[in-house]
Image (spheres, rainbow, N blue to C red):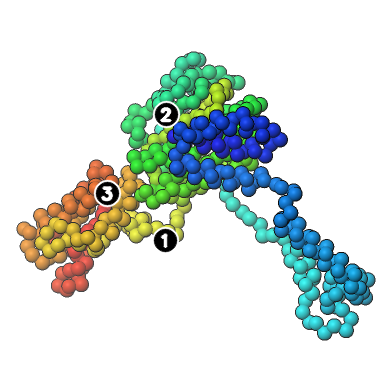
Amino acid sequence: MKKVLTIVAALALICSSANAQGFLEKLGQRALDRAASRTESAADRAVDRAFDAVEGLFTNDDNNDNDPEDNQQSQQIQQSQQTARSGGWTCPECGATGNTGNFCESCGAKKPGSQAASAPASSAASAAASTPNASITTSKSDFVQGSVVLFEDNFTNERTGEFPSKWEIDYGDVQIAVVGDRIVPKFDGEAMIYPLIDKDPENYLPDVFTLEWDMYMARNCPGEIYGFNIFLDSPDARSTVTISYVPDGGSLVNWYCEKAGKRGVTEGSAVDSKTNIKAGGWNHFAISFNERAFKFYVNDVRVVNIPNMEAPKCFKFEYVNSHDYPYCCISNVRLGAGAVELYARNASDLTAVEKSMQETGKFVTNNILFETGKATLKPESMTDIQAVADYMKKNPSVRFEVQGHCDNQGSDKVNDPLSQQRAETIVAELVKLGVDEWNLRAVGKGSHEPVADNKTEEGRAKNRRVEFIKK
């Protein structure tokens, strides 16, 4: 559960305030006690980065004697003083005194009698200073709502004091309440909820979806730390976005995203103004996921942009805090199919299987080899089998027909069952590597579908192949 993220990150956020010391004394021991019992290694890394980000944004020591800018200014002053003491020459154009080089340090005029032909340094610096910086254009508002509603709840027909009827709970206490002009589920302390879905509750998110919700951020609740986790779970991984919030003290968004195929994680954080979170009212949050691309938005501004994340199959909301918080509540939850269009990555960023699937809808290989006349794989075959397994785990809804093909050496009576056995062997290896057997079908094609001339050795080598056909 990465609840320690909320406590420690929020502590970092308030370190720059005038009353930070008293606040830390009040909550520091509580945070340490919670951290001791709930810390995970991944959360530790995320917290370390959050502290680094906060220190970089909020640290400002005006008394730092080693500041490079201060040193440079001091050196310039000393140099000017030395020049003034030495006399130098007087510019005939502007009258500036104390010049020591071949050009006037004020207007750039050449020293009388100087043969220097290069441009004056001060003139070049002046020209550079007058050149405007290049404009920077980025897109941070590209959210596209999923067009097909899969789940939606605005809680308007719920009964006060009851648990929300379209939701299930893992732990804690959540009750329907009226907050302002909205009927909402209110978190009474720490709790975790998830939608009540007719399908498998652990496997209902499509490959392309958006998830949206509103959350109330109270103002003027001093001495408290609040956090909200969004867990995006798959059978093999859990990705998390944590929203940490200190009323009138700042905010922090942390993310911990598992890469597809168990190839590591992507972590990061956005602090305070970059999160665009507003105190004293409702804030809109949204997630967009398209096959592998994950984006997170706060009030329609994109905060997180991850190009490669393990496809989640379900989501859960978890509220965590340091003390009871009477205003934590959500509203207008909407899950939709469809999302921001998938950005085409460069071919160099794609695996051979990904590139082939994008271009042809199938992956064909001649590198899966067997012992002669047998269905026993040679060790070098595992490279391509592993690549297919990685692709299928990254795209868990993809179904493959695994086709085994032979050349025409030997009779159909031998080749047909042998090609079937070899296809079944490949399927068995993929299942061992974590691929869902339901998404695989073995088919032996024998020598009936050649792609090259069987009269040559080169042609026969091309015909001895395995094809993974998307179905």
Q: Residue at x 34, y 40 (%)?
A: 235
Q: Is residue 309 left or right of residue 68?
A: left
Q: Residue at x 61, y 54 (%)?
A: 137
Q: Position of residue 181 (x, y in %)?
A: 59, 21
Q: Earlier in the sequence, mark 3 or mark 1?
A: 1
Q: Position of residue 183 (x, y in %)?
A: 53, 20
- Dot 1 and dot 2 residues touching (CB under 8 Å): no
Residue type at mark 3: give it: Leu
Mark 3 element type: loop
- Residue in the foreground of this view, choosing between 210 and 436: 436
- Quadrant of residue 42 in the image? top left
Indicate which label's residue lies in the foreground, 3 or 1: 3
Mark 2 element type: strand
Indicate which label's residue lies in the foreground, 2 or 3: 3
Q: Residue at x 79, y 82 (%)?
A: 117
| Crowding near the residue tagged with mark 2, few <14, some 14–19, many ≥20 C-alpha atoms within 10 Å | some
Alpha-carbon span between mark 3 and mark 1:
26 Å
| Residue to which mark 1 is pinned | 347
Q: Is residue 128 left or right of residue 253?
A: right
Indicate which label's residue lies in the foreground, 1 or 2: 2
| Crowding near the residue tagged with mark 1, few <14, some 14–19, many ≥20 C-alpha atoms within 10 Å | few
- Residue in the foreground of this view, choosing between 457 and 115: 115
- Dot 2 and dot 3 residues touching (CB under 8 Å): no
Residue type at mark 2: give it: Tyr
Q: Residue at x 62, y 33 (%)?
A: 24
Q: Position of residue 82 (x, y in %)?
A: 86, 69
| Residue to which mark 3 is pinned | 433
The disc at residue 194 is 2
Alpha-carbon span between mark 2 and mark 3:
30 Å
Alpha-carbon span between mark 1 and mark 2:
38 Å
